[in-house]
Image (cartoon, coloured by chain):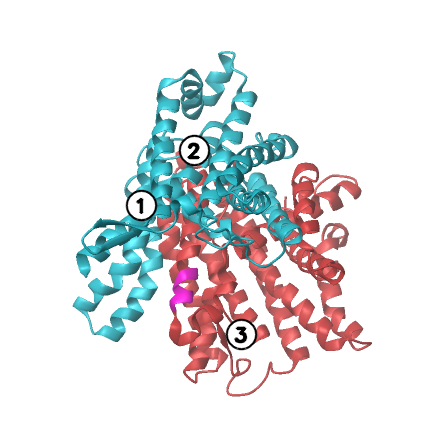
Chain colours: A red, B cyan
Amino acid sequence: MMMPPESGPGFLKREAVPVLVFVLLALVPVAATFGAESYLLSLVTRVMIFAIAALSLDLILGYGALVSFGHAAFLGLGGYAVGILSAHGQTDALVQLPLALAVSALFALITGALSLRTKGVYFIMITLAFGQMAFFLAVSLAAYGGDDGMTLPGRSRLFGLDLIKNDRAFYFAVLALLLASYLLCRSIVVSRFGRVIRGARENPQRMAAIGFPLFRYQLAGYVIAGTLCGLAGFLLANQAEFVSPAYMTWQRSGELIVMVVLGGLGTLHGAIIGAAAFLLLEEWLSGFTEHWKMIFGPFLVLVVLFARGGLMGAIRRIGGGGHG
Amino acid sequence: MSMTLLYVQTLNGLQLGVLLFLIAAGLTLVFGVMDFINLAHGVQYMIGAYLAAMFTAMTGNFFLGLALALPSALAFGLLLEFLIFRHLYDRDHLDQVLATFGIILFLNQAVKVVWGAAPLSVPIPDALSGSIRLMDGLLYPVYRLAIIGSGLAIAVLLGILVSRTRIGMLVRAGASNAPMVSALGVDIGKLFMVVFGFGAMLAGFAGAMVAPILSVEPGMGDNLLILTFVVIVIGGIGSVRGAFIAAILVGLVDTLGRVFGPMLLRALMDPSAASQAGRALAPMLTYILMAAILFFRPAGLFPAKK
């Protein structure tokens, strides 16, 4: 499990993986100057945006054991907040971002309050159903492109300035937000609040018996996760300069779960590694063949059957066991 | 026009409901007996449609094609069970979701490789082509009536099978308490294999039956799968009776909601706002229904586990 960050000689050893991940991400723009700059920057920017989404899902899936199968809805909500405001001439991130987060939080609050009444398979199904509702709502928005989606006039502006128009500037903005999200999630996980959520995963009856109102804790966790994923949606719309209902298909929700599990549940940096592994594998395999899903599907089955704990589990095993 | 339209749309809703039931029946039992969440059930429906299309093209006769497609769909389901599902029973739901998601990715792509990306079409068999006059001004395609009829017949047979036979008794017992059934000396693994194979065949049958009226294409099972989940969750996991009632309910609400929802709204607000709101609301109606039912009955209408 995650330990609270502290300084000392053991710090670097213990934190080697997350530190390495962020150092590598910071070095990508340097490497990109040697060739294929815009391709590499946009690919890794996309990786980092999905890493934020996966991170937010890990918070409830990995630490709370809440298998939300409608998480992509928040990507869409964040994205459509940008798209719809832009269509009405409001392109400033100072307006767009708060609205994207507020809409995501509100949707999470309403759907979470209903979903968390159910457990197990029913929870998976009802979150799936709410995800589909959001999807169909987007499809029906004929004024905003309906099925086809809509192209944005450009990236969001900040104080009326084109601060993130440049790909490199946008890259660092996303990197900073990813780091902030990661640190926020870590502090949540080790807080008293995070411990209650984790306790509810291990033994809900006991936690309730001690006197914790679990429903409220889990709902708060669900809202935090949804809001954070709304941020990822905001960034994704800016990166692609395009939003469409495809943001929130149930397959996309499934992919987010795959990223979290691929990296290793309940490790946070595992979610970042999982997002990177998923998207880079997709990019790499689709370079060989358009039928890359025929390779990826069985790979997924094999990971489930034989590699428990995902990539982080494998790293831990190679690293000689103990706490990661 | 409105009464005729109502009848036609009710029949359409019934047809969708029957299809949903054919897919949901196997899924709810697999769910109920083994607590196994199988996302790949939708691709069984797709495989059924492709097999029917292939065998119909080969033999030149839809009924012969159907007769060949059913055992093939059964064999395919059993093969999947043997290769993959069998190893997932005692895993948690998350592992099951992931592995079956992987199977969907693989098979949706595999049918493209085998049969091409372009949709296939299957001609409606001559014996069932044309329309029949049900009443004044009400013509309805014979083939669609045949789908409704065969679906209802299977529902009745399945009902008898589950409530009157020994294997049905074991299935019901398994759905309400699997460990106890196993402790009493029943080979629960074999029971599950039978249920799974049978469910795969029913889903394949549904796919084969719609092949002549829908285009047979990759991913055709995906969206229907989600509706099927809505059905089994509303009906209560593990209950065939619940699945039947919920399937008809969802089929009718979905079909009638899309047609009459905007009409009703038009009576309440101005036309352009109504058609906009109607387009948005109609596809969401089923999910609102599900959320409402789960709010009052968190385990569905007829839960098998008490």
Q: Amino acid at mark 3?
A: Phe
Chain identifier of the residue bearing label 3 in the image: A
Instruction: Give the numbered dot on residue A205.
Output: 2
Q: What is the C-alpha distance between the residues marked 1 and 3?
A: 39 Å
Residue B84: x and y in percent read 63, 35
Residue count near mark 1 (Cα–Cα under 10 Å), binned few <14, some 14–19, many ≥20:
many
Q: In this view, which residue lies farthest toward the top? A: B185
Which portion, as a residue range, is magenta?
A135-140
Q: Relative to B155, does residue A24 appear above or below in the rendering?
A: below
Chain identifier of the residue bearing label 1 in the image: B
Q: Amino acid at mark 2?
A: Gln
Q: Relative to B306, does residue B101 appear above or below in the rendering?
A: below
Instruction: Give the numbered dot on residue A242.
Output: 3
Residue count near mark 3 (Cα–Cα under 10 Å), binned few <14, some 14–19, many ≥20:
some
Q: What is the C-alpha distance between the residues marked 3 and 2?
A: 46 Å
- Residue B217 is one of the magenta-drawn residues: no
- Residue A139 is one of the magenta-drawn residues: yes
Q: Residue at x 49, y 78 (%)?
A: A93
Splitting the image into 4 quarters, where does residue A90 fall? Answer: bottom left
Instruction: Between label 3 and label 2, give the one nearer the viewer.
Output: 3
Apparent side of residue A263 relative to residue B217 in the rendered image (left or right): right
Apparent side of residue A121 relative to residue B131 in the rendered image (left or right): right
Q: Residue at x 65, y 82 (%)?
A: A166
Q: Relative to A16, does residue A44 appear above or below in the rendering?
A: below
- Quarter of the image where the C terminus of chain B is located: top left
Residue A25: x and y in percent read 72, 66
Q: Amino acid at mark 1?
A: Leu
Splitting the image into 4 quarters, where does residue A44 fall? Answer: bottom right
Label 1 sits on residue: B14
Residue B296: x and y in percent read 28, 42
